[in-house]
Image (spheres, grey):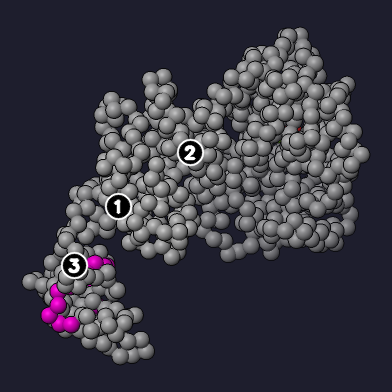
Amino acid sequence: MLQLSDLNGIGPAAIDKLKQLNIESVLDLLFHLPLRYENKTCITPIDQVRSLQPALVEGVISKSFVIQGKRPILVCEIADDSSSMQLKFFNFYYSQKIKMRSGKRIRAYGEVNQGMHGPEMIHPEFWLDKDIPPLSDRLTAIYPKSEGLPQKRLQNAVQQALNLLQSGQLDMAELLPKEWLSQARLPDLQTALKDVHQPPPDVDMTRLMSGRHPSQERLKIEEMVSHFLALQAIRERHQQQQAPQLFYSAAQKKQFLDRLPFVLTGAQQRVLQEIATDLSRQIPMQRLIQGDVGSGKTVVAAGAIDHALANGQQAVLMAPTSILAEQHRLTLTEYFPDIDIAFLSGRLNAQDRREQLAKIAGDARIIIGTHALFQDEVLYRDLALVIIDEQHRFGVHQRLSLKNKGADNNLMPHTLIMTATPIPRTLAQVVYANLDVSVIDELPPNRQVINTVLLDNQKMPQLAERIKAACQRGEQAYWVCTLVEESEHLRAKAAADTYEELKAWFPHLNIGLVHGRLKNDEKAAVMAAFKDGGIQLLVATTVIEVGVDVPNATLMVIENAERLGLSQLHQLRGRVGRGSRQSHCVLMYQSPLSQNAQIRLSTMRDTNDGFEIAKIDLKLRGPGEILGTRQKGAMQFRLVNLETDKDLFLQAKNLAQSMQKSHPKQCRALIHRWQRQAATLAKV
Ligand code: ADP
Ligand code: MG
């Protein structure tokens, strides 16, 4: 395959610059799509140029002169058969003035302004006399470019790549089935690439600029097909492994359900049944549970764990923070009073760590912890089930490395991932195409809608009354500090300062403080005291964002809520409203608010629905941000926009499925063409 360095004008320096644009091959270059286009295919008579519109004009220079001032301006008056206009240059070389003598022919391209003396162009692109090129018959693409790499150079490199493609010197075959293309009325690869880089002048510009020209759609569909195929390949590779077949009798299940302090919701029962079906097969489960905050995912995890325990095997439950892991330990200790539970987090002392590792390799049946469970020296005895809670916090590769742990007897454990990131269904189908998805779409009974109010930072006395009243009723409150400082140290300090202030405000309340700088057992002690009711008001950083479950807490105050994104606010607010009592959330803010912050805060005030909030979040931030760093790399699309192109998903998915049967060779080639990490991702 030809390299970038084979192109004329692309030396080592340019290659470096291209790298900054993520262009590392000729193929990448062809998939680097233009931002916009310029029409230099026809000359507009000067009397027809329109203000604020770009135009290509050509005429003879009637005079050129310099207006002296703080900044000298070179003015060049040109005339064609129809009229005349001025070209103006603020920064010019003396040599340029000499070249622009009257009588010379000049062609110029630029945006037209209405000046004092009629139409004018400021700093147009121009060509003189012999340098005037023949008119192009295609529109000129303008690319997103990196500092120091001239647009011309990029255009020229793309032109060369297109020529190579046309003459068949580029190894880029058509991989989509011809019948499908003609049926869908979409162009072949070569035409599509030519069209997007060098569209004909009569192209439908509105469609092109909205990314919906058939040539663009064709490329996007190809990229999506490749994406589905890559995920499918991962899935298949996984399914070729053997998993332990886990049995679970109706009696065993009933015993578990009878131990619970509540009855499962319909949604919980359904999801648990889906999991049970997976676990009873020899194919490793790869299931994702989506359920809004407070929908009761933990008990579903416990049900799956019980299923594994019934077979004498081990189950792991992993959480993104030590606070959440510790809480799961307490909850599962309640659900499984007689079971030996091991606990591993990053900050255990050497002896505790040795002890826990020994338990994990030995008699422990349930293992709970943080990402420390991923470390190489953690060896399981017979791991049958891995549950990952709040998975948006974990990277895709970490997930893989944990799965491999069960390899001691060549069996792959079943995997269950739980997330509260409520991404819309259409998006979930793309991002999680390699997983089966279950949705807990029902909240436990008697939940009251959390009442959310917005309060200006100045209104502390009003808030103080609310806090006192809640604590007098025997309920508890969170006070969340949201310093967005990168440093954990500064965040901790800000929380400590607030803690001191609140102690002065509420001398009669028991106030606690938790932040990321505390040791694990200190954190655990504070959280336990809060759970027991010993602490009435808990001052916290966003360490409590995910998973924390203290149903008696009914009031949450979030300081400077305008600093946080919607999904983070929703997660935080989900710490209250977990029981049957009316809960409140006070979002304090510092005015004036940006428009975006206004939308976020009023959305929080107006709805409690995680999916609704996710939709708005998606509009405000785009999918890349929401899915987090996990998706960067592995799920990065070159052309597809997960939000605006979602109506193409289904078409692409169907095509991927049919191609798997009819065109397996092309499928492999498609993965390699589009997936930068094809080799590591899918080993195909
Ligand atoms: P999340 O989905 O956010 O992880 P949790 O599993 O922490 O939610 O559950 C939230 C709260 O709801 C917990 O206090 C839990 O005990 C309670 N809960 C879960 N399921 C039910 C149910 N079916 N009926 C009543 N309460 C429930
Ligand atoms: Mg949870």
Few, some or many residues within 10 Å of mark 3 (<14, 14–19, 20+): some
Query: Quick check: marks 1 and 3 in contact, CB under 8 Å?
Result: no
Identify the residue at image location x=20%, y=69%: 131
Question: In the visual, does 489 lie left or right of 352?
Answer: left
Give the camera-side residue of 453 and 572. 572
Q: Is mark 2 within 8 Å of ligand 2?
A: no
Q: Residue furthest left?
A: 81
Query: In the rendered image, which residue does mark 3 sit on?
Result: 132
Q: Amino acid at mark 1?
A: Gln
Query: In the rendered image, which residue does mark 1 sit on?
Result: 159
Mark 1 vs 3, N-terminal side: 3
Q: Secondary structure at mark 3?
A: loop
Q: Which residues are magenta?
A: 101-115
* Image coordinates for residue 207, horizontal then vertical, percent: 29, 46
> In the rendered picture of this protein, how many numbered marks are placed on residues?
3
* Image coordinates for residue 119, horizontal then vertical, percent: 20, 74
Query: Quick check: marks 1 and 2 in contact, CB under 8 Å?
Result: no
Identify the residue at image location x=69%, y=58%: 486
Relative to 58, does residue 92 appear above or below in the rendering? below
* Image coordinates for residue 412, horizontal then vertical, percent: 68, 22
Measured Cα–Cα span from mark 1 to mark 2: 24 Å
Q: Amino acid at mark 3?
A: Ile
Q: Amino acid at mark 2?
A: Gln
